[in-house]
Image: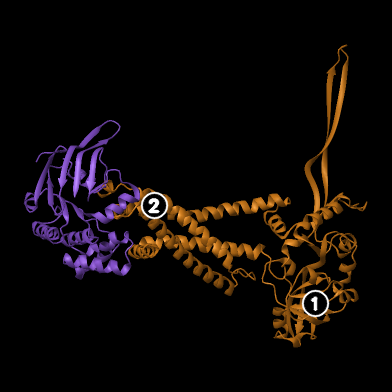
Chain colours: A purple, B orange
C-alpha cells in the first residue's frame, strides 16, 4: 500500500543544510497498522508528511495505493489526498467556525458529493466514533478526546485506504488515549484501513502490528 | 460548489459577529456616503424640471464695467559701434500692472433688449428679474411673495410643470397685462387651495390686482433662476426699471442653445459683444465684460470667488474630490486590513482543507466568495441606509427646498465598485493563503 524507496529529505537555509531523512526505505502492506517511534527531531513527522504528500522528498520514490506519486502536484495531488488519504493530527485541527458534522463533511466537500449524501456519510462516521449526539455542537464545546474522535470521523468519512496519524494520543490522558487507540484498531480491523501512526508512547505502539524506530533521520529497526 | 461556498461564507460570517459587524459597517457606510454625495451632486448640478435642458443653458447674470491700469516701461540699450560711436535703441512697452477699477451687477432690460437678442445658435432665451419681493393681501392677511418679472421666453427656456392653466404669452407681455403665474405653494398660501378654480382668480399684489393664469409646481431645486413664488410679465415691473437706459438694472439673461455643443458659440458671441462694445464717453470705465457660463461654472465661480471659471472649477472640485477620496479610503483600507488579518488567522483551517483535498483554486475561490458575500450584504445595508437618510433629509427639509433623490443606476455602479474593491481586497491575501504549505501551517 505504501512504498518508500531511498527517501531523503533535507531542509536548506542560506547557510545550513539539515538532513531530516536519509535513504529511508519502508514498505507498508495494505491493512497493516504501523507505528513509528523515535526521539524528537528524528524525522517521524517528516516521514509522515512525505507519505501524506504534504511534503516532497529531496530524493527517492514514493508509491501509494499502487500509484507512483512522487511527481504529483497541483490538483492531482489534492484529488489523490482527498480520495486515498485521511489525516489525524495531534492538535486535532478542527475548524472552530464549523459544527462537528460540518467538520466531518469537509473531505466530501471537495469530492463534489451532494449535500444530503454528505450529511448521511458524516453522521455515519460520527456514529462509528460514538459522537452522533454531538453532531451540531461546535469544536469549542467538546473535550480533547471528543475532538480527536471528530478528527477520526473526518479522516474516515471519505473511506480512504490510508490513515496517517501524527501523535493522535499525544494531547490526551491515558484513558482518552486508550479510547482513541481502540477506535483506530477497530477501524483497521473492520474496514481494513492501512494506518501509519507516529507516537512517543511505547504502550500505544505495542497495540499496533509493527513498530518502526527512527533516529537521526535513519531507520534503526 | 457555489452553494457550498455561499453556505460556508454565511456560517463564517455568523460565527465572527464582531468582524462581520466591523466589515459591514465599513462597507455599508462607504456606500451610503457615496450615494448621498452623488445624490447631493445630482440635486445641485443635475438637470431637473424646470431646468431640464441644463446642458444647453448659458447664464449671463451680470455685466462688469472695468478700467485696467497700465505701466509704461521704456528700455534703452546702448551699443558701441565699430567706429567707437554710440548707438541707442529704445523700447517702449505697455502692460497691465494688475490694478483695476471695476463695478458689476445685473443689467437693465433696455441694455439686454438692445444688445442680446440676435445671437446665433440660440433656441430660446429669456430676460428676467429675480430681485423683488411683493406683499400680497387677502382678507387683511399679508403673504410675502418672491416675485420674478419675466418675458414670454422664460417659459420656453424653463419647462415648468403646469398643474392648472397656462403661462402668459408674448401678447400679455407686450400689452403689459396684469396676469400672474404662481406656484402651488403660493396658491395654497394665498388662496388656501391648489385647484382649477384658482385660475382666473385675482390677487392683490401691492397696490395692483393681477389675474392668475397658471399654477406651476414649485421647483425643488436650488437654482436662483426658477425660485420664484409668482411670475409676472416683465412689462408690469416698475416703469422706471423697465424703461431705464442705464447699463445696470435688475435683469439677467439665460440662453438656451440649439444643442449642448453650441453653448461655447453663444459664450463667444457674448464675449465678442463685450470686446467690441463702445462705452459712452461720459462713462467712468473703459470696458465691459459679462463672464457668461454654464450653471456649474457660475456656481463654482461664485463659490470660490474666482472669475476664471476653469480655475474656479478646479479650486472647488479638486479639494472636494480629494477629501471625498480620503474619507472613503479610510473604511476601504480598513476592510483590506481586516481581510488580511482574518485570512492569516485562518491559516491552519486552510492547511486542513488542503490536507483533505482542497486545491489552491478551491481555497482562492472560497475566500474571494466570502469577501463578495460580505460586500454584497454590506451593499444592501448601505442601500437601505441611503434610502432612509434621503427620506429623512427630504421629510425634514434639511437641505431647504432641495430634494435628494435615489438613483438605482448610481446604486448599481457603486455596488459594482464596492464589489470590485471587495474582490481585490481579498484577492492578494486569498492568493497567498491558497499557496500555504500544509506542513508548515499545521506545525
Helix, strand or loop at mark 2: helix
Residue under mark 2: which chain is it in?
Answer: B
Earlier along the polypeptide chain: callout 2 or callout 1? Answer: 1
- Name which residue lies at 36% across and 65% down: B7
Q: Is residue B313 shown left or right of residue B237?
A: left
Asked where in the image residue B296 lies, by quadrant, the reply is bottom right
Query: Which residue is more in the foreground, A207 or B31?
Result: A207
- Name which residue lies at 86% across and 50% down: B275
Q: Residue furthest front?
A: A66
Marks 2/1 in contact by CB < 8 Å: the verdict is: no
Asked where in the image residue A83 lies, by quadrant, the reply is bottom left
- Badge 2 local density, few (<14 within 10 Å), some, or many (20+)? many
Q: Is residue A161 shown left or right of residue B423?
A: left
* Figure disc tally: 2
Residue B176 position, x and y percent, is 88, 76
Query: Which residue is more in the foreground, A171 or B211?
Result: A171
Residue A56: numbered disc? none
Residue under mark 1: which chain is it in?
Answer: B
Asked where in the image residue B303 lies, by quadrant, the reply is bottom right
B436 over B126 or under it: above or below: above
Question: Rounded to the nearest whole Å, what is the CA distance between mark 2 and mark 1?
Answer: 65 Å
Helix, strand or loop at mark 1: loop
Q: Are marks 2 and 1 on the same chain?
A: yes
Q: Is residue A20 visible?
A: yes
Q: Which residue is mark 1?
A: B167
B376 over B139 or under it: above or below: above
Q: Which residue is mark 2?
A: B430
Residue A42 position, x and y percent, is 16, 40
Q: Is residue B433 visible?
A: no
Q: Is residue A114 shown left or right of residue A203?
A: right
Residue B44 position, x and y percent, is 65, 64
Residue A49 position, x and y percent, is 23, 46
Amino acid at each position: 500500500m505504501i512504498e518508500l524507496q531511498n527517501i531523503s529529505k533535507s531542509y536548506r537555509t542560506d547557510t545550513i543544510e539539515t538532513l531530516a531523512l536519509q535513504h529511508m526505505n519502508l514498505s507498508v502492506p495494505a491493512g497493516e497498522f504501523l507505528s513509528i517511534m523515535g526521539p524528537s527531531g528524528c524525522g517521524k513527522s517528516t516521514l509522515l508528511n512525505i507519505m501524506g504528500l504534504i511534503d516532497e522528498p529531496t530524493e527517492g520514490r514514493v508509491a501509494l495505493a499502487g500509484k507512483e506519486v512522487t511527481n504529483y502536484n497541483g490538483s492531482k495531488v489534492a484529488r489523490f489526498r482527498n480520495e486515498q488519504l485521511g489525516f489525524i493530527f495531534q492538535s486535532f485541527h478542527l475548524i472552530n467556525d464549523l459544527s462537528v458534522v460540518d467538520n466531518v463533511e469537509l473531505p466530501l466537500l471537495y469530492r463534489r458529493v451532494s449535500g444530503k449524501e454528505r450529511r448521511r456519510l458524516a453522521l455515519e462516521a460520527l456514529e462509528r466514533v460514538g459522537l452522533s449526539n454531538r453532531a451540531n455542537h461546535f469544536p469549542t464545546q467538546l473535550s480533547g478526546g471528543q475532538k480527536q474522535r471528530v478528527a477520526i470521523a473526518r479522516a474516515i468519512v471519505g473511506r480512504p485506504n490510508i490513515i496517517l496519524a501524527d501523535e493522535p494520543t499525544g494531547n490526551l490522558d491515558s484513558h482518552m488515549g486508550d479510547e482513541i487507540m481502540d477506535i483506530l484498531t477497530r477501524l483497521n480491523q473492520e474496514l481494513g484501513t492501512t494506518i501509519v501512526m507516529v507516537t512517543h508512547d511505547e504502550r500505544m505502539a505495542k497495540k499496533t502490528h509493527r513498530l518502526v524506530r527512527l533516529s537521526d533521520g535513519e531507520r534503526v529497526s | 460548489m457555489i452553494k457550498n461556498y455561499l453556505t460556508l461564507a454565511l456560517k463564517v460570517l455568523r460565527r465572527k459577529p464582531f468582524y462581520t459587524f466591523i466589515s459591514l459597517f465599513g462597507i455599508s457606510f462607504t456606500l451610503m456616503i457615496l450615494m448621498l454625495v452623488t445624490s447631493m451632486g445630482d440635486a445641485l448640478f443635475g438637470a431637473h424640471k424646470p431646468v431640464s435642458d441644463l446642458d444647453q443653458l448659458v447664464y449671463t447674470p451680470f455685466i462688469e464695467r472695468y478700467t485696467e491700469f497700465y505701466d509704461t516701461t521704456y528700455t534703452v540699450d546702448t551699443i558701441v559701434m565699430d567706429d567707437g560711436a554710440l548707438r541707442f535703441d529704445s523700447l517702449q512697452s505697455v502692460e497691465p500692472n494688475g490694478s483695476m477699477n471695476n463695478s458689476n451687477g445685473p443689467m437693465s432690460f433696455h441694455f439686454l433688449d438692445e444688445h442680446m437678442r440676435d445671437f446665433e445658435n440660440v433656441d430660446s432665451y429669456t430676460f428676467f428679474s429675480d430681485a423683488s419681493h411683493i406683499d400680497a393681501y387677502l382678507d387683511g392677511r399679508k403673504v410675502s411673495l418672491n416675485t420674478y418679472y419675466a418675458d414670454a421666453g422664460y417659459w420656453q427656456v424653463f419647462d415648468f410643470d403646469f398643474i392648472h392653466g397656462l403661462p402668459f404669452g408674448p401678447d400679455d407681455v407686450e400689452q403689459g397685462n396684469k396676469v400672474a403665474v404662481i406656484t402651488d405653494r403660493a396658491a395654497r398660501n394665498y388662496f388656501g387651495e391648489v385647484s382649477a378654480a384658482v385660475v382666473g382668480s385675482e390677487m392683490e399684489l401691492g397696490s395692483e390686482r393681477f389675474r392668475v393664469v397658471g399654477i406651476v409646481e414649485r421647483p425643488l431645486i436650488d437654482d436662483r433662476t426658477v425660485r420664484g413664488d409668482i411670475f409676472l410679465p416683465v412689462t408690469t415691473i416698475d416703469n422706471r426699471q423697465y424703461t431705464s437706459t442705464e447699463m445696470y438694472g435688475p435683469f439677467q439673461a439665460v440662453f438656451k442653445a440649439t444643442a449642448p455643443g453650441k453653448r461655447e458659440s453663444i459664450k463667444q458671441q457674448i464675449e465678442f459683444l463685450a470686446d467690441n462694445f463702445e462705452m459712452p464717453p461720459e462713462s467712468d470705465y473703459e470696458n465691459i465684460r459679462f463672464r457668461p457660463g454654464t450653471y456649474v461654472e457660475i456656481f463654482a465661480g461664485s463659490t470660490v470667488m474666482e472669475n476664471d471659471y476653469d480655475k474656479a472649477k478646479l479650486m472647488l472640485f479638486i479639494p472636494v474630490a480629494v477629501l471625498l477620496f480620503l474619507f472613503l479610503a479610510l473604511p476601504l483600507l480598513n476592510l483590506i486590513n481586516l481581510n488580511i488579518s482574518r485570512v492569516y488567522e485562518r491559516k491552519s483551517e486552510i492547511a486542513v482543507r488542503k490536507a483533505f483535498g482542497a486545491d489552491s483554486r478551491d481555497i482562492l475561490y472560497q475566500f474571494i466568495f466570502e469577501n463578495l458575500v460580505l460586500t454584497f450584504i454590506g451593499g444592501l445595508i448601505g442601500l437601505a441606509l441611503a434610502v432612509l437618510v434621503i427620506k429623512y433629509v427630504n421629510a425634514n427639509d434639511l437641505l431647504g427646498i432641495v430634494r435628494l433623490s435615489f438613483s438605482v443606476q448610481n446604486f448599481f455602479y457603486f455596488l459594482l465598485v464596492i464589489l470590485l474593491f471587495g474582490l481585490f481586497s481579498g484577492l492578494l491575501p486569498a492568493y497567498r493563503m491558497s499557496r500555504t504549505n500544509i506542513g508548515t501551517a499545521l506545525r
